[in-house]
Amino acid sequence: MGIRPGMPVAEVNTLLQARGLSATEAMTHRPYDPAADREALEKLARWACRFSPCVDVEQREPADTLLLDASGLAPLFGGEDSLLCQVQQGFARIGLKSSLALAGNIGTAWGLAHHPPAELAQRDGTGRTLVSSDTEQESLVRQLPIEALRIPATLIETLHLLGLYHVGQLMQVPRGELKARLGMEPLVRLDQVLGHKTEVMQAARLPQQFAAQWILEHPTDHPESIHTMVMRLLSQLLQQLAAHDLGALKLTCVLQTANRRETSFEVGLFRPSSCNKHLRGLVDTQFERIRIPGPIQEVTMQVVQFARLEKRQQSLFQEMSWKDSSAPPDHSQEISGLVDRLASRLGRDAVVRPRLVADAQPELAFSHTPLVGQPPRRTTRRSEFGPLERPWQLQSSPTPIDVTAVMPDGPPIQFRWQGEHHQVERHWGPERIETGWWRRRAVRRDYYRVETTTGHRFWIFRELTRQNWYLHGSFD
Amino acid sequence: MLSTPTIPDRAKIDQLNAQLREMERSRPASRETVSCGCRALDRMLPREGLLRGSLIEWLAEGAGSGAQYLALTAARQACRAGQTLVIVDSSARRGSTLYSPALSGMGLDLNRIVLVRPTDEKQALWSLEQALRCPAVGAVLGFPRQMDSYAYRRLQLAAEQSDGLGLLVRPSEVRGSPSWAELRWQVSPRPTACGWGLHVELLRCRGYLGDGKVDLTIDEQTGEIHEAYSGSLASQLAHPTLASQRA
């Protein structure tokens, strides 16, 4: 259709329309995000660690290449060609088309992967280039276009203007001339591709993973044996964590039967912990609840979330210092223990920290965040309301009530709620709340705090669109 | 042979009495007290405050009666030294929830509140007991409806173990049922001209036979709880202590 890389979107739209295609249907476009690209490549680098112990994303911007250190790998994969083949198949399995090259140095491999030599590419047409000897490498490098040198586009243009199209041509230019006219970069790249200058690769750092697995030869459904396995795995994981000074925040355990039926449980913690006894207790409560689906063959336990352990200085004379100091003893350990116990029995969402949310709509002005399974956050927001301005019990949803008001827009005189008749003695308001239009659920309310003749206090509002009354809270 | 009754000396009897009282308590009475957040209420109590490691009950007369306000004020006092307040909010099942903006407006630090939302009464009692047992918790606020002597005893022991304060707000329908709590207040609102009027009656106080009743007023702006003055405004203003405060 004539669409090329680097074309403006408007031009592409015109081209599509010329062909009778609607631009919105035929094309999706996204803004260019180099940081996201690099991130995705880094993720891919971690994936590619299955082939080589040392995988790196190239340093050049924009990065589009993964570098794998292949020294000593060939025998493990049954030869160099087989290695390339397996890597390519691996990428194909995750839906990626790859162009690969294996060579004696990074520069050559990069150049060959980006610009596969015509005769080799035609020979197998697979997008794999394998350099078997140094002499072959030399001749291949000479034939490479200068684009294969990892130099900026402006430099390539200059070289083209000078009539230099191949690395071989560039090699014939005296080095002093090159340096004087074009700076150091072409020389450095040339030396790298020829292997005169070594290049260092940094292995992509794997995120630490803590997992332990136990596979049984003979599956069992004996609960005590399974329990023992789970506990041993837990101890293993905790030892691993302790070695890195880390504590677990969230653990998952998956029990799998021979016919791939699974049951799993999760343990979340309030503060990172690597205390064997504490975690054992939590795992125990969860373990009691699961139903074992059949003979278990495989038990996998993984630390999904972890964080650095909070260190506290131990006092040498604990008893004495506790008595001497007027400050209350530090109880953070006990609190996290309590929260973990509550959450493991009642569920993660049942043990929460109330928070304020900046929203004018009263029922949306707060949130409940679970305390376990996530790093602690503090809130600094404080309510701007006076002590008696908001009810401390809020109805989950406003309850419709019958209200008598003297004037159509006036304050309430009496109302019925839960079958009881309330006569309003005093009222404060109206406090008008009009908000939520951006949620497409606009609310328009006039709130009144009312005190009945018996002294009871309630929070009621008139819905202004339909003129209905609701009770929203009570000062219990 | 006839035994002649010997009359022991007075000091011995006093000593034995003291021992008996000591044994009646489940723990030695050397515990610190927490203010209710209101002088008038403190004055009614034998120790001039709420004893740490005990259970306090507030009976609320219907919705909108203000009993929770007194309980939350006491909780704020108990957690002054940076301890945690655990609220076991079982009201969610009854169609309402504790409203955090109001708690923050009362001066409670939300960072130090752990809100527990159990799904049934049994879990609520279990959570109350667990929270009371924790030494880092300054006060535990709960809304249990049904409580038998067994539940009371468990909560009481848990509170004693940690020196925490167990605050229970319950409906006034349970007024006739026996209580093992240290204190039981009945709170009912009363109409007043200014502020919010509450009538508080001390139904039960261990080791104290007084029949305390007091009228309180909550200030609309500051939220402070004062004893309501009986008599006219003019005489209030002329009251010597007040006049000296104003001067």
Image: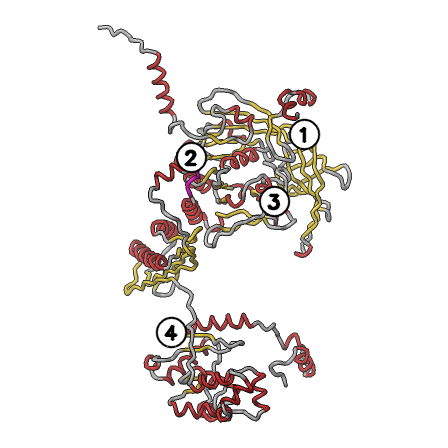
Q: Which residues are magenta?
A: A326-330
Q: Which residue is mark 4?
A: A53
* Residue B122 is at least partly visible in this image: no
- Closer to the camera in the image, B74 or A133: A133
Give the spatial CA distance, label 1 vs label 3: 24 Å
Q: How is the image coloured?
A: secondary structure
Magenta-drawn stretch contains A412? no
| Marks 1 & 3, CB-CB < 8 Å contact | no
Q: Which residue is mark 1?
A: B194
Q: Are marks 2 and 4 on the same chain?
A: no
Q: Amino acid at mark 3?
A: Ser
Classify 10 Å Cα crowding around label 1: few (below 14), some (14-19), many (20 and above). few
Q: Amino acid at mark 2?
A: Asp
Q: Which residue is mark 2?
A: B163
Q: Is residue B210 above or below residue A347?
A: above
Q: Quadrant of the C terminus of chain A?
A: top right
Frontmost of labels 1 and 4 is 4
Q: Amino acid at mark 4?
A: Pro
Q: Are marks 3 and 2 on the same chain?
A: no
* Residue A429 is at least partly visible in this image: yes
| Marks 3 & 4, CB-CB < 8 Å contact | no
Label 4 sits on a secondary structure element that is loop
Give the spatial CA distance, label 1 vs label 2: 38 Å
Frontmost of labels 1 and 3 is 3
Q: Amino acid at mark 1?
A: Cys
Label 3 sits on a secondary structure element that is loop
Label 2 sits on a secondary structure element that is loop
Give the spatial CA distance, label 2 vs label 4: 57 Å
Q: Main secondary structure of the magenta part?
A: loop
